[in-house]
Image (cartoon, rainbow, N blue to C red):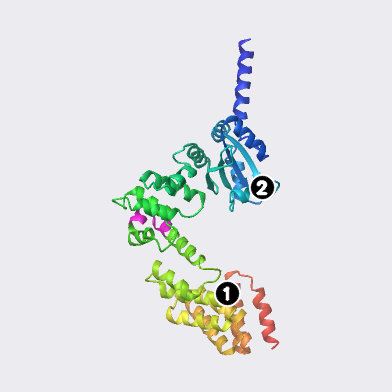
Amino acid sequence: MKSILSSVFLSFLTLSVSAQSEINFHKDWNEAMAEAAKTNKLIFMDAYTTWCGPCKMMSKNVFTEGKVAAFFNENFVNAKIDMEKGEGPSLARKYRVMAYPTLLFVDSDGNEVHRAVGYLNPDQFLELGQVAQDPSKQMLFLKKKYEGGDRSEKVLLNYSNALFDAYSGGHEQVALEYMNLQKDWGTEDNLKYIFKMMEGIDSPLFGYFKENKEKFENLFGKDQVERRMESLVYDSIYAMGEVPTPEQVQSVFVKAYPEKAAMLTAKYKIRYALEMDNMDQYADATIDYFKKFPSKQADEYNEAAWNFYEMVDDKKMLKKGVKLAKTSVKLEDGYYNNDTLAALYYKLGKKKKAIKAAEHAIALAKAEGIDAGETEELLKSIQSM
């Protein structure tokens, strides 16, 4: 009898645990609102789309985590709404959902009290739920406090973090207000905060980051600091429009990389010409770049020379493309750059030189175990000139 009772108890326990193995979601918004009013709980809404990869990852790896499911099932009414079907589009407009997943917390009257955007791991998601339950950290509460003139450290810190998590903009200005209350910007907590909150290269936060780069490298490592710098530069350029002019981009490079600004601007002029589909400008910009900033990388010259072959028709400029290919070969005598040289000679009508370069490329390919089929076809075309 004792054994039977033990088995029954264990079965019951197993069922209880499995019942908490995933978040119980409503698929109907009105049902979720009604239950929230009845239970006096906040609604957690997973605002997702069927094509969103991070949404699928959260459904598979986070919403099924036992401790996550137990916490959210106990403390929230949960709703999972496709933003592109049924009532989803109207909810997306109402709550300004523009990225996925958007993780919303709403009261029973439909007021948004907190949000975050993007994939969160189980621990991060649990922390988000705990923050959403804390009135002193809810975005709605913090917004009212801030707009009411409260500039205490606690409000500024919590509000800037809430804005950052929500991807709603404005976090950097609030973060700067918080930092201006700090006597020492160089503490570990403040360095981490600055590193997180920087949004553009015109902010005093970026100025401090740039002037104290070594401190950040000691804390985060050189690679991570460099990636953060590149991200800020990219965001600043992207904010200028679809295809900023070289003059616009140069202003960013001067602020971020003053010692490399001229070189980066010269390189950008090449890309800009391609974007504008101006092959004459592209050829001039490429020649100007290598004249001012010669490289030791054979591949860099070869890539530029191949672009000349594919996109430039002017014979005068094609000859300059040949010089680029010859420089590449001089740096490293390989199959690919000799193939490029052969193609350029072919386009210029230089039959003997084209044959010589193509045959050399094929011989190198055989020695290196590379398939030279395309060059062999090129050689046939050259011989039939």
Residue 1 lies, in percent from the top left, at: 63, 9
Q: Nearer the viewer, residue 189 or 129?
A: 129
Residue 260 lies, in percent from the top left, at: 40, 71
Circles 1 and 2: CB distance less than 8 Å? no
Under mark 2, the amino acid is Gly
Q: Nearer the viewer, residue 140 or 287?
A: 140
Element class at badge 2: helix
Asked if residue 247 lies in the magenta stretch, the reply is no
Considering the whole magenta stretch, tell me its main secondary structure. helix
Is residue 21 visible in the rendered image? The answer is no
How far is mark 1 from mark 2, CA to CA?
Answer: 38 Å
Q: Going by the picture, which residue comes out furthest to the front?
A: 148
Question: What residue is drawn where x is 44% and y is 78%?
Answer: 294
Q: Is residue 191 left or right of residue 277?
A: left
Asked if residue 220 lies in the magenta stretch, the reply is yes
Element class at badge 1: helix
Where on the picture, by quarter, is residue 81? top right
Question: What residue is drawn where x is 43% and y is 80%?
Answer: 292
Is residue 36 visible in the rendered image? The answer is yes
Q: What's drawn in magenta, residue-wise? A: 215-225
How crowded pointer 1 is (Cα within 10 Å; few <14, some 14-19, many 20+) is rated as few
Question: In this rendering, is residue 287 above or below 16?
Answer: below
Q: Going by the picture, which residue comes out furthest to the left?
A: 183
The C terminus - image quarter: bottom right
Disc marking residue 230: none
Under mark 1, the amino acid is Glu
* Residue designated by label 1: 275
Q: Earlier in the sequence, mark 1 or mark 2?
A: 2
* Residue designated by label 2: 88
